[in-house]
Image (cartoon, rainbow, N blue to C red):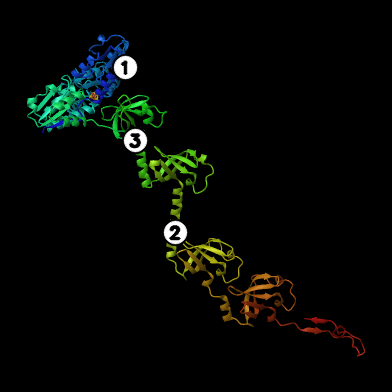
Amino acid sequence: MRDVTVAKTAGFCFGVDRAIKKLDDVLNKYPLPIYTLGPIIHNNQVIEKYEKAGIKTAEDINQITQGSTVVIRSHGIGKDEYDRLKEKNVAIIDATCPYVRKVQNIVNTYKTDGYKIIIIGDEHHPEVIGVNGWCCDDAIIINDKKNIPIIEKYDKICVVAQTTIIESLFEDIANEIKNRCADAKIFNTICAATEERQKEAAEIASKSDMMIVVGGYDSSNTKKLAEICRQYCNKVTHIETAEEIDLNILKECNKVGITAGASSPAWIIKEVAEKSMEEQNNILQQYEETFKRFKPGDIVEGEIISVNSDSVVMNIGGKSDGIVKKDEFMQDLYEDLMRTAAIGDRCKVMVISTNDGAGNLVLSKLKVDEIEAKEKLQEKFDGEEILTGTISKVVKGGVMVDLGSLSAFMPASYYDIKFVKDLNALVGKSITGRIVEYNPAQNRIIFSHKVLLVEEIEKRKAEQRAIKEAAVAGLELGQIVQAKVKNFTDYCVFVDLNGVDGFIHMSDLTWKSIKKPSDALSAGQVVQAKITELDKENFKIKLSIKDLTQNPWEVFKKKYNEGDKATVKITSLANYGAFAEIIPDLEGLIHISQFAHTKIDKPESMLKVGDEIEVLITKIDDASKKISLSIKDLTPAPKKKIEKNKKVYSDDDKVTIGDLFGKIKID
Ligand code: SF4
């Protein structure tokens, strides 16, 4: 069975395809006479078909009659010709290939900037003639490295290529020019379609016994294809139609390759393929497979081939071009589509419909953007990434957050830990957060800023717990530690133990009687204390300062008994007496009646705080831990003096005790 391979790139390029479609469109919409300026493509069969439909080929503008319609072919024309056409009062349909238009624009711009234009290509090719017409017909046109003229006289050179020349030829000449001119602007304007077609042809030719190259004999790119194929295959035949296949050669070949120039219509390639082998059905299928088939929902990458203010036309590799309406291309309809999209740009689109009624595919870029945005968001949701968005508006129950290509809903309670009174005040604010709920099928994207705040709090708590754990790790029950006084309550002092808090009850501060904790300590003071209770799990640490000193009552009891003398220091005065420190942290009371043998009205009339005096310990009450002291008992009681009576009374005299003892004087 013969193995036939049809090149995927065989046949109309999109530039030719576009020109043919425009011509078909003109044929449907415009009355005759209709002209093409030069053959619409280099293919006699196609030209014959249109001639039969009434379309004439004008070789010169003078042949075109006023009031007619003129189609400019994909090769384009020069500026002068274009201006002459405009003066002729004809309808002009410009089917110049966008890639050729790009070359025209380059030479026009650089010519204006004072560059000498060099076109690498065939000086007789209509595309080259047209391009030259956009730089005042003043370009140097060369197609051989040997023919490079003396270019050293030009300071600035701009080099472009005929879109269909062989890449290696362009590189050879361009490199030579670059070496000889310091300011050489080199533009490789060879059409990618041509390059791909040539590469594939070489590849198929290298594996084939016979290579069939289909295309017009005048077609420059078809001739070049045949030339390339001959480098890889011994049997190469250039034909225009299937009838020209040499069956004698064909029957000797098991592997046959078929390629075709850019101006070969699909039906001719199909005929050639059918004739190339017996198994027609297989070949038909193979040929059909060279075109991509689409169905609604397919996502494909394509290239923008034209743009206007309402829509973009794309080549996505199918038989038909695809149309993307502005509202399916961009979100902001106030933006200018022609500034956003440019010919040659590539992007992914979704097929919405395979026929818009005129045979074109209906495409959407926004649908692909949305799918891609959702995929990215899914990744961010799965990865719990922190996102930044802008609060765009207030809606029922919350706000919308603009995340770029998608918007998320943030319930009011997901903004802050605290209640937010006025959501309108948040509009326009940039905000960080995380997607906490995501259901792309239902377009449900729930955003939360609060989740970050809660995490921050939890993080701080964990850090504090770690500090506390480290602090308590080294503590033991009964250990004496340094503690710094932090703050007071009515009955407690809180202290810092290197990162963890402890507390000392007022009763554990001192053996002395105090009314409040701040009577014993002050904030910031560093003291030593003993750990008396330790709960490491709950960081509960109770301490005592009092436990660090001996019980003064015990000390006192060992040293003193009732009736002993002691030297004491007056610590405070009260109406009823004075308190005196007997040993550190232990006081006794000198009641005012024990001050002296005479009556004392006020303690301060006899004593003052700080006085050191000697007292007698008169009573020690173990039960109440009270000590009574006396000054008076250390001094002898005064003697009473009786005055001598001047009068002696008889038994019969009535006298009183006063009469008998008179006045008693006490020393
Ligand atoms: S070969 Fe390329 S540049 Fe030439 S008409 Fe086709 S697409 Fe346009």
Give whichever of discs 2 and 3 has the lower sequence position: 3
Q: How many marks?
A: 3
The amino acid type found where label 3 is placed reads Val
**C-alpha distance separating marks 2 and 1:** 83 Å
Q: Is residue 565 above or below residue 389?
A: below
Q: Which residue is mark 2?
A: 465
Q: Residue furthest right?
A: 652
Q: In this image, 77 relative to 217: left or right?
A: right
Quadrant assignment for the C terminus: bottom right
Q: Which residue is mark 3?
A: 368
Residue 90, x across and y down, in percent? 31, 12
* Structural crowding at the residue carrying mark 2, measured as other residues with C-alpha within 10 Å and reported as few (<14), some (14–19) or many (≥20): some
**C-alpha distance separating marks 3 and 1:** 35 Å
The amino acid type found where label 2 is placed reads Arg
Give whichever of discs 3 and 1 has the lower sequence position: 1
Q: Quadrant of ligand 1?
A: top left
